[in-house]
Image (tube, rainbow, N blue to C red):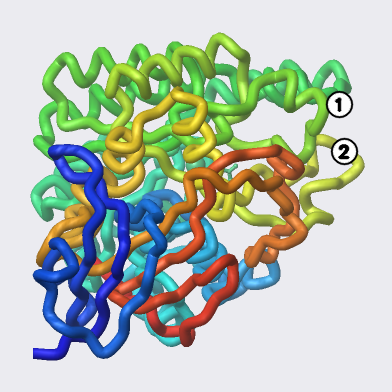
Amino acid sequence: MVIDLVLSNAKIYTSSGIVTAGVAIENGRILRIAKEANLPQASHTLDLHGHLVLPGLVDMHVHLRDQQLAYKEDFVTGTSAAAAGGVTLIADMPNNIPPTTSATSLRERARLAENHIFVNTAFYSAFPEDLAQLPSIVKEKAIGFKVFLSNEIGGFDTEDNNLLTRAFTQAANLNIPVAIHAEDKKTLENAEQEVKKTCRTDVKAHLETHPAIAEMKAIQRIVQLFENTGGSLHLCHLSSAIGLTSFLAAKKQGLRITCEVTPHHLLLSNKHSKRLPRLTLVHPPIRTLEDTKALWNAVTNRQVDSIASDHAPHTIEEKTTESIWDVKPGIPGLETTLPLLLNEVNKGHLTVPDLVRMTSEVPARILKLKDRGSFKAGCYADLVVIDMKQKHEIDASRFHSKAKYSPFNGWKVKGKPIRTLVNGRLVMDEGEIVAKAGTGSIVS
Ligand code: NCD
Ligand code: ZN
């Protein structure tokens, strides 16, 4: 038997430690991981020269844009950025133009993406105004429902408790997770009114319009509404110590609840936002050093389920408007997430198994993705090869994303993704995209 590909000289993490082995790949999946002498012959061999190989990242929070927001990012540039960053699967958020909020819009978005994606792509939907449409959206392969509590998508009223509870119950019955951007709308509106009265334009003024208490209130409200539905609730981008406390309390109560944190909320605090007020502007905002410490503490204690980028690209013009109030919120993160996290591994702040758990295994489990996110025989060969020793400087001008800026630009880090394989095919080699668009699959 001659199989498709063997990765030779790979350094592999197993439950019993690091071993040097080969990986046999056939029909896009991992056939076997074993000493090379025990692997079948392959038509191609890729020598990994003793580099570490891990499951590719499953980034469960990506704004891929395209369609009428293609000027910010499109399927080609966004998924190239993913491949360059060692991300092999992304879950796309629904706040697009047109918004993903019906079976028709989802089908059209998937159709447009199909031949343009370099990594596997899944789609969230927003809740439709008419909840009777939920089953058809799930049938069209929505991976989950996303709710922006502070920023409605389509006509769904997120202030209506009754409607939310019915939506959560239906999602639970359809066995599909709900992901929440947890910032309480009324709290933000009141805070904004107060702050804008003072005509302030400093970065602290923006932070005051998105107080941590808004995160806490939103979580507490949603947890109450979710409590008796039996469904799975996922909290996106936790940013504050008090938000985290509310999440942990809900978990203790026995709710099926998970959370994600982003590299920017872990690594940036007000000293960075003072220096780069516009490029660090994001929702929820970059907060205090104490908040980052609480988030790190939760990472270390294995209380954080996933790390996602919340890749939210905008044009540089949209990020550098004169008034701070006009700056579009969001940070491009697909090409910095893994290098930043590998640097934390090298610094001893994170272990490789914890990294893999939060960036691949658990996100795949939350999104109920079959045979993805794990490095074992039978799973898809979605892999990233890593040079743990390579020191490099983050250079946003070389991003594949259309958003060629980053608050991390110029950061010196150690550890780099050097190759990415998607469905058994080499997609990124030393920073270059080497596969055809369409190598990624639409997944659900
Ligand atoms: C997101 C975007 O740009 O789509 N921005 C962000 O700051 N995270 C939307 C959002 O989550 O508010
Ligand atoms: Zn969000």
Identity, as a three-letter code, of the amino acid under mark 2? Ser
Local packing at callout 2 (Cα closer than 10 Å; few below 14, some 14-19, many 20+) is: few
Tell me, yes or no, whether the two marked residues, 1 and 2, touch with CB atoms within 8 Å. yes
Residue at label 1?
201
Q: Position of residue 137 (x, y in %)?
A: 25, 67
Would residue 161 be seen by someone viewing this image from the given angle? no
Q: Against 142, is 305 above or below?
A: above
**Nearest the camera: 205 or 164?**
205
Q: Position of residue 66 (x, y in %)?
A: 57, 71
Q: Give the secondary structure at mark 2.
A: loop
Residue at 55% in and 29% down? 265
**Nearest the camera: 4 or 125?**
4
Left/right of residue 279 with respect to residue 350 in the rendered view:
right
Q: Give the secondary structure at mark 1.
A: loop
Left/right of residue 79 with respect to residue 371 in the rendered view:
right
Q: Position of residue 256 (x, y in %)?
A: 16, 31
